[in-house]
Amino acid sequence: MIHATLFQYEDPETPMTYPINGRRSFSGAVHGNLLSFPIALFTMALACDIAYLNTAEIQWTNFASWAIAGALLFGGLVAAWALVDWLFKLRRADSSSRLFYFAVVALMWLLGLVNAFHHARDAWSSVGTMGVGLSAATTILALIAGWMFFSRTARLEAAR
């Protein structure tokens, strides 16, 4: 049902309220956009590793290496942003969830760095079981971080 003020839409199925105008905080919007890159690029690296294992075409390892490098670049920005966000909001009740989010993002970045070093090896030994495992772990951690961030954003938007 749309309220007369036209500022909020209340879904009859759930008790949540969503802003119609789509306003979010600038920092939350930038953080969400930065987080989307590691999610997509780590997933792309995993897909490239699987393609390499199925085809033995060396170019797939190059694609995976570049995807991991891009994910590390944006993942580092996300980790720095999450750390600053946690430090500025230490006294809030959700401080522990922000710390856990930062820990997931930091672990994602560290495993991504190990994965980048592993993919920098000789082409025939760069992927293998260890490379695919690291790519899968970083992809899972990136998806968990995305779920944590966007579910928290939805909760904060509903509370306003």
Image (cartoon, helix red, strand yellow):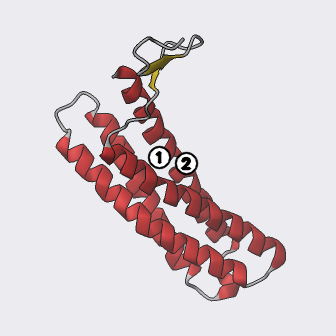
Estimate the x, y position of residue 128 in percent, counting from the top left: 69, 73
Q: How many marks?
A: 2
Q: Are marks 1 and 2 in contact (CB under 8 Å)?
A: yes
The residue indicated by pointer 1 is 145
The residue indicated by pointer 2 is 143
Is residue 150 visible in the rendered image? The answer is: yes
| Near-viewer residue (141 or 41) | 41
Measure the alpha-carbon separation of dots 1 and 2: 5 Å
Residue at the (42%, 61%) spot, across then down = 75
| Crowding at mark 1 (Cα within 10 Å: few <14, some 14-19, many 20+) | many
Residue type, numbered disc 1: Ala
Residue at the (19%, 38%) spot, across then down = 90
Estimate the x, y position of residue 18 in percent, counting from the top left: 46, 24
Residue at the (38%, 50%) spot, across then down = 31
| Crowding at mark 2 (Cα within 10 Å: few <14, some 14-19, many 20+) | many
Tell me the SS state at disc 1.
Answer: helix
Which quadrant is home to the C terminus?
A: top left
Residue at the (57%, 10%) spot, across then down = 12
Residue type, numbered disc 2: Leu
Estimate the x, y position of residue 74 in percent, counting from the top left: 42, 64
Residue ranking furthest to the bottom = 122
Estimate the x, y position of residue 127 in percent, counting from the top left: 66, 75
147, above or below 13, in the image: below
Is residue 126 visible in the rendered image? The answer is: no
Tell me the SS state at disc 2.
Answer: helix
| Near-viewer residue (49 or 85) | 85
